[in-house]
Image (cartoon, helix red, strand yellow):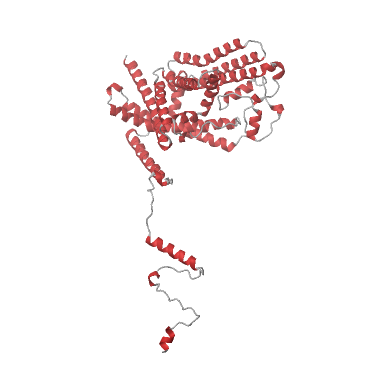
């Protein structure tokens, strides 16, 4: 009776819910402090889902569709392998040839015979061409000679800058190829600087001609570049210190431009506030270190390989030729990188800091180049700017097409490099011309079909193997020429 009364529900009172057996969920941590029951069940379901479901649709990390981009470990692995590989090559070179680095040998060779180093004489003579250019511009500004006469005098002076060193080096048959290359480099730089100097001053005369040259030349216009420099430097410029035409035709102004790290002339260059001594010393140390490293690689690696394995191509198998190319490729590429950093960064920044020259954009991120066109225009911004300013734009403004302007820039660049390489060796083989011509279809293919990481990889292959192939060809021809000359 009592048992039945306990089982019978009391009217008006809800029965107590039966307690469920939760022994199968004993391993789940129940959050008793959370009073919200819905939150409890959501957490319970999520815990069960994590426990029961361990797979979902995902891509492998090395697949391009995965979106994974953190390859820092692979990059570190590549660097470690690269260091170990080149360490093995260094030890192999030392075991084969011994230690050949001797900086004193280079200095002794340069000072042994004055005729083998005619650079000092020809570089001093270049000041005559600079002063002649200044005198011609002064005559034109004073209206003492006509524009036609002034143009003729300028072209004769510029031609003499290029061809007189060639004549002198041809007469001095004992001059070294390195000394000749340095002389021709300096004279070609002066040629481009003075051409820009004449062009800009001609533009200044043409700008003020409609206003009357005598009355308008003292007014600072847009060609003085004061507004642009003031906006970029963020400082105020006293107009009394602004140089205007023809007050820029002074010895001080033209020699500042000659030594400044630029090929393009303008009045009132951007200037830095002061000379930073620490920055100057760092660049000087880099120059000193990189020069010795460059000479060490040349003596220890390049010269022994070319000396012991050089023979005529007709006597070599194709596999031997490729092997020799790769032997030269790595040290030649290292020397190219050292030259780039030592000249375009250390040397040019040293000159800019010493002269308080403000525009330090000597190069851009050419190492990220996905096309050869981007590499050509960003690895040497100074030369590219000169070509665009004084060759490409004048041709386009005079009615020529963009393709004709680009072809003219390409042709002049090719002849310039041939002048610097072939003339010192006294061998005109046009290997540089052919190599740059072959780069044109490669650049077109990269620009049209290949971009991204693959394009950048192909550009790096061209950078590593292209200069190495040129060096290999010129060294081979130089060796054959002198070998035949000695046996004759």
Position of 12 relative to 280 (above/below): below
Where is residue 209, by image quadrant? Answer: top right
- Residue drawn at point x = 39 percent, y = 41 percent: 83
Which part of the image, by quadrant, shows the C terminus? top left
Position of 67 relative to 226 (above/below): below
Which part of the image, by quadrant, shows the N terminus? bottom left
Q: Give how far across and how far down residue 205 sits, in percent.
A: 64, 17
Which residue is situated farthest in the bottom direction here?
1
Which residue is situated farthest in the front direction here?
11
Where is residue 256, by image quadrant? Answer: top right
Numbered disc total: 0
- Residue drawn at point x = 45 percent, y = 13 percent: 171
Q: Give how far across and how far down residue 152 sits, in percent.
A: 57, 11
Camera-side residue of 9 and 142: 9
Q: Give how far across and how far down residue 344 sits, in percent.
A: 51, 31
- Residue drawn at point x = 38 percent, y = 59 percent: 53
Camera-side residue of 446 and 199: 446
Position of 157 relative to 473 (above/below): above
On the rendered structure, is 42 left or right of 197?
left
On the rendered structure, is 81 left or right of 415?
left
User: Taking the image as drawn, is residue 273 in sight?
Assistant: no
On the rendered structure, is 302 left or right of 156?
left
User: Taking the image as drawn, is residue 6 in sight?
Assistant: yes
Position of 311 relative to 276 (above/below): above
Where is residue 132, by image quadrant? Answer: top right
Camera-side residue of 408 and 353: 408
């Amino acid at each position: 009776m009592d048992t039945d009364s306990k089982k019978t529900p009391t009217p008006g009172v809800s029965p107590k819910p039966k307690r469920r057996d939760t022994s199968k969920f004993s391993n789940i941590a129940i959050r008793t402090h959370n009073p919200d029951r819905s939150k409890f069940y959501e957490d319970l379901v999520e815990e069960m889902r994590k426990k029961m479901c361990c797979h979902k649709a995902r891509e492998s990390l090395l697949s391009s569709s995965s979106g994974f981009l953190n390859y820092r470990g692979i990059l570190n692995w590549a660097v470690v392998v690269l260091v170990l590989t080149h360490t093995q090559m260094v030890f192999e070179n030392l075991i084969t040839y011994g230690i050949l680095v001797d900086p004193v040998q280079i200095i002794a060779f340069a000072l042994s015979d004055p005729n083998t180093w005619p650079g000092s004489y020809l570089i001093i003579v270049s000041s005559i061409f600079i002063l002649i250019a200044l005198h011609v511009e002064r005559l034109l500004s004073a209206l003492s000679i006509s524009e036609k006469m002034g143009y003729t005098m300028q072209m004769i002076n510029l031609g003499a800058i290029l061809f007189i060193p060639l004549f002198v080096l041809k007469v001095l048959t004992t001059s070294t190829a390195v000394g000749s290359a340095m002389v021709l480099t300096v004279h070609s730089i002066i040629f481009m600087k003075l051409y820009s100097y004449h062009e800009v001053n001609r533009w200044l005369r043409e700008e003020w001609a409609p206003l009357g040259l005598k009355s308008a030349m003292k007014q600072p216009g847009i060609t003085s570049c004061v507004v642009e420099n003031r906006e970029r430097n963020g400082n105020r410029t006293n107009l009394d210190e602004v140089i205007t035409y023809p007050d820029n035709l002074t010895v001080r102004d033209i020699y500042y431009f000659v030594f400044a790290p630029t090929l393009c002339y303008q009045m009132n260059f951007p200037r830095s506030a002061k000379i930073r001594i620490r920055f100057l010393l760092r660049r000087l140390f880099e120059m000193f270190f990189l020069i010795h490293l460059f000479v060490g690689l040349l003596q220890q690696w390049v010269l022994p390989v070319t000396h012991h394995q050089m023979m005529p191509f007709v006597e070599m198998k194709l596999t031997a030729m490729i092997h020799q190319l790769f032997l030269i490729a790595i040290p030649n590429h290292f020397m190219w990188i050292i030259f780039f950093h030592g000249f375009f960064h250390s040397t040019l920044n040293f000159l800019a800091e010493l002269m308080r020259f403000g525009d330090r954009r000597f190069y851009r991120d050419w190492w990220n180049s996905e096309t050869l066109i981007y590499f050509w225009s960003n690895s040497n911004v100074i030369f590219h700017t000169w070509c665009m300013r004084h060759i490409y734009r004048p041709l386009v403004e005079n009615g020529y097409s963009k393709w004709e302007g680009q072809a003219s820039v390409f042709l002049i660049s090719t002849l310039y490099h041939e002048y610097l390489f072939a003339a010192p060796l006294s061998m005109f083989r046009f290997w540089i011309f052919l190599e740059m011509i072959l780069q044109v279809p490669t650049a077109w293919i990269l620009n049209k079909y290949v971009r991204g990481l693959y394009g950048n990889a192909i550009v790096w292959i061209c950078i590593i193997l292209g200069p190495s192939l040129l060096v290999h060809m010129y060294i081979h021809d130089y060796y054959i020429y002198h070998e035949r000359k000695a046996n004759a």
